[in-house]
Amino acid sequence: MADLKNDSFLTYAYILLYIALSSGQIFFNKWVLSSKEINFPYPLGLTLLHMVFSSVLCFVLTKILKVMKVEEGMTPEIYATSVVPIGAMFAMTLWLGNTAYLYISVAFAQMLKAIMPVAVFVLGVAVGLEVMSCKMLLIMSVISFGVLIASYGEININWIGVVYQMGGVVGEALRLIFMEIFVKRKGLKLNPISVMYYVSPCSAICLFLPWIFLEKSKMDEHGPWNFPPVLIILNCLCTFALNLSVFLVITHTSALTIRVAGVVKDWVVVLLSALLFADTKLTIINLFGYAIAIAGVAAYNNYKLKKEATRDTADASNHEAVQSQQSQPLTSR
């Protein structure tokens, strides 16, 4: 009984840690990028720092200290054909998403992110991973309608920020599609630490090239920026801790739990941002539209989980059937 209570306590602790770190990282990035005191409006540079820090820390933890294990089986061919596209899309997602904070509020950016299942599903249909159905068309319509209403209720809408945020959504949708095609369907089993170990250096390189052309000259011309080293380390460490918390939640709970926690986190970010940032002005139309979109997201998550459970059951049945046939004695003809 005591062990069960301890397990439950740890589960809730990991979930709360994930929600706190995920929300905190969003607020931290917004503050760093928009604060006049720090004077660091460089989303590419900030994201590049995150990826370099993550790459170095992953290497230290897995290869030097050896406190974490990286899944084996990675070859140069698999890295070039699978990890590089995923790393490029991950870099694109973080870059464009952080850039959006320069133009729109955290709450509105979070509301626009609710369109993610629609982007994933449409791209999935385009590449043959998903099949269009009346039920999914209804769910996608509900999510789209909710995001549209939330956008209509936005007081200080900035279309440049909307374009950046939607670009980040497309990048994340492509990353998820690539994960399905290049990793899961190839039978690669990578835990989040392994994904960070392999993807972070690739993302850093993908971010370094545009940073040279788009932000380096601006940073040189702008003069000194007041970004204390301690603050840089804390910001990067928060990003790494967030990825680690995802690993802990997935390990100790289920796919349903992490998705429910994600929905709770979204609402926490939307509501808290109104208290923390002056550029966030929530309206009844905002919240009503977002509630509709989240209801559609919940329906989508439920549909995907049922589909995955059915597929896992079918795979288990096929495996048992094969084992049963193999165990039967051979008879002479």
Image (cartoon, rainbow, N blue to C red):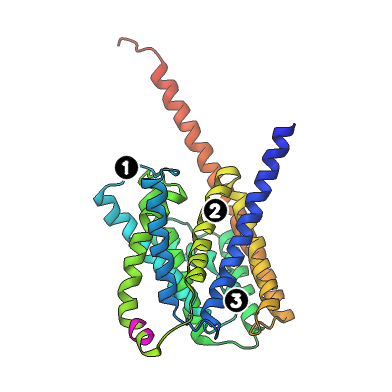
Q: Which residues are magenta?
A: 215-219
Identity, as a three-letter code, of the amino acid under mark 3 = Val
Circle 2: is it few (<14), some (14-19), or many (20+) Cα within 10 Å?
many
Note whether 75 is above or below 36 in the view shown. above
The residue located at (59%, 43%) in the rendering is 252
In which quarter of the view is residue 217 placed?
A: bottom left
Q: Secondary structure at mark 3?
A: helix
Q: Is residue 299 visible?
A: no
Q: Picture coordinates of residue 37 (x, y %)? A: 55, 84
For image coordinates 34% across by 77% down, the residue present is 211
Of the pair 283 and 99, the residue shown nearer to us: 99
Circle 1 residues within 10 Å: few <14, some 14–19, many ≥20: few
Where does the image place residue 102, in percent across and percent down from the top left?
A: 52, 83
Neighbor class of circle 3 (other Cα within 10 Å; few <14, some 14-19, many 20+) is: many
Q: Earlier in the sequence, mark 1 or mark 2?
A: 1
Q: Amino acid at mark 1?
A: Gly
Badge 3 or badge 2: first in the primary sequence: 3
Residue 280 position by quadrant: bottom right
Marks 1 and 2 sit apart, C-alpha to C-alpha, by 23 Å
Considering only vertical position in the picture, is 69 above or below 293?
above
The residue lying toward the viewer, choosing from 121 and 78, is 78
User: Which residue is label 2 attached to?
Assistant: 246
Point out residue 68 in the picture as x, y percentages from the top left corner.
44, 44
Spatial separation of the CA atoms under disc 1 and disc 3 = 40 Å
Name the main secondary structure of what is drawn in magenta: helix
Rendered position, 316 above or below 35: above
The residue identified by callout 1 is 73
Indicate yes or no whether the magenta region holds residue 217.
yes
Residue 192 in magenta stretch: no
Residue 109 is left or right of residue 2, and the answer is: left
